Image: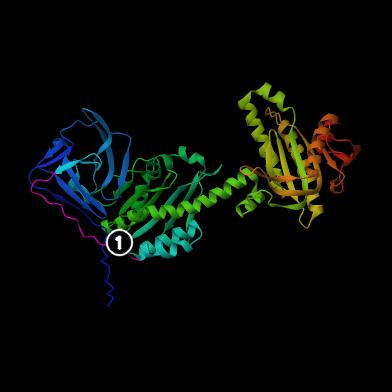
Amino acid sequence: MNVHATPNVKGYGISVEPLHGRVAIYRGDTLLAESHNAKVMYETRLPPAIYVPREDLCVELSPETDLQTFCPFKGTATYHDISLPEEHLTNSIWAYEDAFPESAGIQGHIGFMPNIVTRIDLGENQLRQPDYGNISGPLIDWLMRGASEVNTPDGFTKALAEKMLEHGIAIQRLSILVWSLHPLIAGKHYIWEKDAAEISTHTPSYEIHDHPAFTNSPLRHVSNGLGGVRQRLNNDNPHNSFPIIEDLRAKGATDYVAMPLPFSDGRTNVLTLTCDHPDGFTTENLGLVFECSTVIARFYEVFMQRENAQVLLETYVGKRSGARVLGGEIRRGDGDDIDAAIMFCDLRNSTALEEQLGRDAYIEVLNGFFETVSGIVHDHDGEVLKFIGDAVLAVFPAGDDAVGARSNAQRSAIEIVEKLAELRSDENDYHCDCSIGVAYGRVTYGNVGSRERLDFTVIGQAANVAARLGEYGKTVGHRIVVSQDIEPACQQAVPLGAIKLHNVSQPVRSFALQTSADILMNT
């Protein structure tokens, strides 16, 4: 007969008990500590930990090291080195200098890292292994089974808060701060509040690191590896560690905790919980969240890895190209033959500019040039494929609208020239001028390169012609030169005839575009 036993389900537990008589702690033959006032801490899923009063140490401690760790019911642990006659033991001893109420019994005591101690003489004491059972319930069941079905970080944050409430954790507010890899955004901050219908999502820029609201906040404290934060918000604890604590107290909060959410790459993100129960968080409920924190962190890491991949691909290869790579076009030769207008925009006199301005100022000018060109290209449904030295290669796919692609390319070229002229005339010492070539034709749009290093780009005669037309424009004083395939979309085009271009076998009938900037300069 098969018997199915009901599992022993209990909450997270922690207790501190005194030990009796003499307790001695050794490393080899060296006595590290000897005490008649030692204590043992029993904690769920951890081996019993022996603590002795600091004055009962038999070795000298170093000052506090940089290492800190956090426990939501013990506090932030600080660490010390010890030096023995034949060895130096780094971060070998810890202490909770400001222990939380659940662990007040170890205030003023120290503990030893397990690998430091080789023998403990407990005298008449015998340690027990507490039977805390297994932690389970709605939150863990959801993390194990249902959480993977949530496909956005906003949705996951909302579901996570709701499952905590279902589990009996009296949260009033939950927030998750995760750092990202983005050229403009430092990270994402998701905030759930009990009375709000939707998750609020904030995307702070990198200026957040200098903003007073962040520099004097638990978020900075935790993410900088300074340990977690726990503060009761009742009458017995009138002082606030951070300004936000007073705001939460005013909203009826009774307890606050901020704990690390570590990612596998070493970055420390932050989970915060605010309680509205009169007695604050229970040890069992807070222990449950702490036990689940690494699993919760992995879900957010998956979300952020995908967002980071998308952002980095869009940043380095463009939005359309990035989407195709992320969609699986990652092998050499993957790509399509498309009709497109190709624009090659080159910064004029760049060598002289670098010599004149110096490297730092030149790079600032170059970035301003790229910003101007990219913004205008994107505004006309084009995509910047790459920056080649001091030049921009952009593509305007035709799809079902060849006339629209030609028109977008020529309008972009004109707006770029006029915008740069406007910047030069503002008496702000702006130095940028450009030469632009535009051509239209069939190109291959996809992956080329070696097996280990690929480039998502356009290959074809139109791309070659666009680059050569830009070079030709420099020699004859025209800022924009287009092929005859573009000319039907142009309003002001000056025929240049059939031009012999470098490395192009047949002459290309071409036109120069007149902009308002050119007309003003010639009058």
Q: In the rendered structure, which amino acid carries the disc numbered 1?
A: Ile
- In the image, the segment drawn in magenta is 121-137
Q: Quadrant of residue 54?
A: top left
Instruction: From this view, report whether residue 47 is shown above or below residue 349.
Output: below
Position of residue 334 in the picture relative to residue 75 (left or right):
right
| Quarter placement of the C terminus | top right
Percent position (x, y) of residue 130? 20, 57
Task: Work out whether residue 325 can be spotted.
Answer: yes
Instruction: From this view, report whether residue 130 is shown above or below residue 203.
Output: below
Task: Work out whether residue 194 can be spotted.
Answer: no
Residue that badge 1 annotates: 135
| Quarter placement of the N terminus | bottom left
Percent position (x, y) of residue 257? 33, 50
Helix, strand or loop for disc 1:
loop
Residue located 66% across and 49% down the image: 321
Q: Quadrant of residue 317?
A: top right
Q: Which is more toward the observer, 74 or 451?
A: 451
Q: Which is more toward the observer, 349 or 447?
A: 447
| Main secondary structure along the magenta-highlighted residues | loop
How many numbered discs?
A: 1
